[in-house]
Image (cartoon, rainbow, N blue to C red):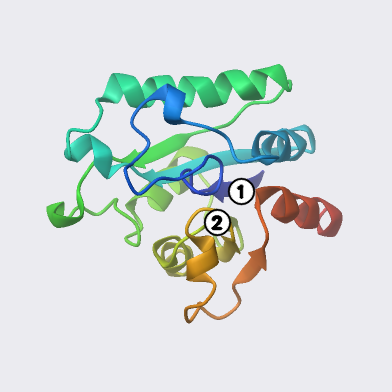
Amino acid sequence: MKLIILDRDGVINLDSDDYIKTPAEWIPIDGSIEAIARLYKSGWTVAVATNQSGLARGYYDSATLDAMHDKLRALLAEQQAQIGLIAYCPHGPEDDCQCRKPKTGLLEQISQHYQQPLTGTWFVGDSLRDLHAAVSMQAVPVLVKTGKGAQTVQQALPEGTLVFQNLAAAADYLLKNTH
């Protein structure tokens, strides 16, 4: 199975320091839905690993989060595509859970779900948390300059990090350079 893992906020949809709290605020980044659709139609399974501390902070509930993900799935369905497992951490930074990135619980969940190690799997994110989680699971750290990525790219990145303008550019590269 060809598997790619994406962070959500700042990679697939616009991010906000005020959190994405409603389906109306969940707005895809230009080209991201089409990029996921191209990957899917080329035989890739696309999974998501996302920290959602807004749940712990009380900014929205799980039904609202599900509605945001339903919106993502509906937009992909319009492109005759779909997304796989969406693994999310509902905890806040102070909860010391094992799933909040940069810890590896979400990636372990995806690995177990698909019964596949993540060695060499691309994990596309916009923050150092994403990149460090990828490295911890021997996945390929991929940074996009959308979301927080424009600031992240100015920091010391893990060795081997691939950097792209956005998810569409990352998908283009992946589709041209893999079989």
- The residue sitting at 21% across, 44% down in the picture is 91
Query: Which residue lies under the disc numbered 2?
Result: 123
In terms of depth relative to the viewer, which is nearer, 81 or 167? 167
Left or right, 133 with respect to 61, comes to right
- The residue sitting at 72% across, 33% down in the picture is 37
Instruction: Say which element carries label 2.
Output: strand
Is residue 97 placed above or below 58 in the rendered structure?
below
Residue 108 at x, y = what percent? 39, 51
In primary-sequence order, the first of circles 2 and 1 is 1
Q: Which mark is residue 4?
A: 1
Residue 173, image quadrant: bottom right
Q: Alpha carbon of mark 2 to alpha carbon of mark 1: how far? A: 6 Å
Instruction: Say which element carries label 1.
Output: strand
Q: Quadrant of the N terminus?
A: top right
CB-based contact (under 8 Å), mark 2 and mark 1 = yes
- The residue sitting at 58% across, 18% down in the picture is 74
Going by the numbered disc 2, the residue's amino acid type is Phe
Q: Let me know if residue 138 appears in the view.
A: no
Q: Let me know if residue 71 appears in the view.
A: yes
Residue 86 at x, y = what percent? 45, 35
Residue 18 at x, y = what percent? 32, 43
